[in-house]
Image: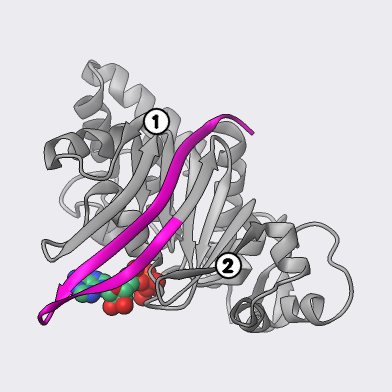
């Protein structure tokens, strides 16, 4: 694992509601290294998303962030909108849950990757196209040269998510924020996207913040875990520590919600992060299974 790229200290996010400030995230602190995956987990409303959106100035006008978030020497909290715009896409990329809303339906997926590249780099159209096809190959889009000219609706949900990941990687970000990257996908495709993200983390040196409510996803990806409840961190540790010996009752509850993980939590030792975490019809699907972006026949 590489150098520390992000140091967050006492990050607090508040919203003006009625006639007072409501604290959505209360004094969050963590560090992230290059190549590391930090999962921020918790149920809906716990503050996962806003804690990351605040890093990028993506809070609504009624929101404010205080504290510090230092990205490789640059303080993000308090930066102007213009400066933050530069950071987004250059230094930091985000993968959202629903690729159909993030991709523009009227342009081909290849064109959209090319545009991202050309916004950030001085590249001729030919070089940008070559690079876009390379990125599509990296995220394992079938026949990338042909898929380049397809529109988002002509691809499967899993393939669209792969395109979003390619676009997010286009500018070689230092920090990648993945907000529920697999939640909208069919369960089999989820496993494939997670496998892709695991492979990529070996190949790109970005630090990854993975936002999810799903401990199964966390088990499969994370090096370290922050568990949030009502805006506060209730537990923070390595994946091993938290899966083997969760301290907080809320963490135990989250783990117990994933049936096959519950066995490990209640009983015997867990040797290393579990590799098989996706369930189809209550049967664990090994993530090493051959990939297919098509839903399984039921
Ligand atoms: N614009 C807003 N105005 C007021 N409160 C907000 C606003 N946006 C979010 N909140 C509140 O901030 C808290 C944290 O929200 P956040 O979206 O970070 O939760 P989350 O853990 O990511 O949940 P989810 O998984 O549902 O997105 C919640 O209580 C939410 O209601």
Q: What residue is rendered at 71% in x and 72% in y?
A: 246
Residue 193 located within the stretch drawn in magenta: no
**As drawn, 164 above or below 247:** above
Circle 2 sits in a helix, a strand or a loop, which is it? Answer: helix
Check disc 1 and report the residue beneath it. 133
Distance of label 2 from label 1 (alpha carbons): 25 Å
Give the vertical position of 294 relative to 89 (above or below).
Answer: below
Secondary structure at numbered mark 1? helix
Residue 128 visible? The answer is yes
Q: Please tell me whether residue 193 is drawn above or below residue 25 in the rendered image.
A: above
Q: What stretch is highlighted in magenta?
A: 1-28
**Image coords of residue 252 (percent x, y):** 67, 80
What's the mark number on residue 102?
none
Image quarter of residue 18: bottom left
Relative to residue 160, is residue 35 drawn left or right?
right
The residue at 41%/74% (across/down) is 46
Is 2 magenta? The answer is yes
According to the image, label 2 marks what residue? 188
Ligand 1 picture quarter: bottom left
Provide residue 132's location: percent of width, then percent of height.
35, 30
Mark 2 closeness class: few <14, some 14–19, many ≥20 residues within 10 Å:
many
Would you say the magenta stretch is mainly helix, strand or loop?
strand
For the N terminus, give its image quadrant: top right
Of the residues under marks 2 and 1, which one precedes in the sequence?
1
Q: Nearer the viewer, residue 295 or 281?
A: 281
Q: Where is residue 257 in the image (x, y as percent from the top left)?
A: 62, 84
């Amino acid at each position: 694992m590489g150098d520390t790229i992000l140091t967050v200290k006492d990050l607090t996010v508040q919203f003006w509601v009625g006639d007072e400030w409501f604290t959505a995230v209360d004094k969050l602190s963590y560090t992230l290294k290059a190549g590391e995956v930090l999962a921020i987990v918790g149920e809906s409303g716990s503050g996962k998303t806003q804690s990351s959106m605040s890093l990028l100035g993506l809070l609504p006008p009624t929101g404010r962030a205080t504290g510090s978030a230092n990205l490789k020497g640059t303080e993000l909290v308090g930066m102007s909108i213009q400066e933050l715009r530069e950071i987004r896409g250059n230094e930091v990329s985000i993968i959202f849950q629903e690729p159909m809303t993030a991709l523009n339906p009227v342009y081909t997926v290849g064109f959209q990757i090319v545009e991202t590249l050309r916004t950030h780099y001085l590249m001729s159209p030919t070089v940008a196209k070559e690079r876009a096809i390379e990125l599509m190959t990296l995220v394992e889009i079938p026949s990338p040269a042909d898929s380049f000219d397809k529109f988002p609706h002509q691809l499967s949900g899993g393939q669209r998510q792969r395109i979003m990941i390619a676009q997010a990687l286009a500018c070689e970000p230092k920090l990648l924020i993945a907000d529920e990257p697999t939640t909208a996908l069919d369960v089999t495709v989820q496993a494939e996207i997670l496998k892709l993200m695991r492979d990529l983390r070996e190949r790109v040196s970005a630090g990854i913040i993975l936002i999810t409510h799903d401990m199964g996803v966390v088990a499969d990806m994370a090096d370290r875990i922050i568990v949030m409840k009502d805006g506060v961190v209730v537990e923070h540790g390595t994946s091993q520590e938290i899966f083997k010996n969760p301290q907080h009752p809320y963490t135990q509850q989250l783990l117990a919600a994933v049936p096959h993980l519950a066995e490990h939590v209640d009983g015997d030792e867990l040797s290393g992060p579990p590799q098989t975490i996706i369930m189809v019809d209550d049967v664990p699907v090994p993530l090493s299974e051959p990939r297919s972006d098509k839903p399984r026949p039921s």
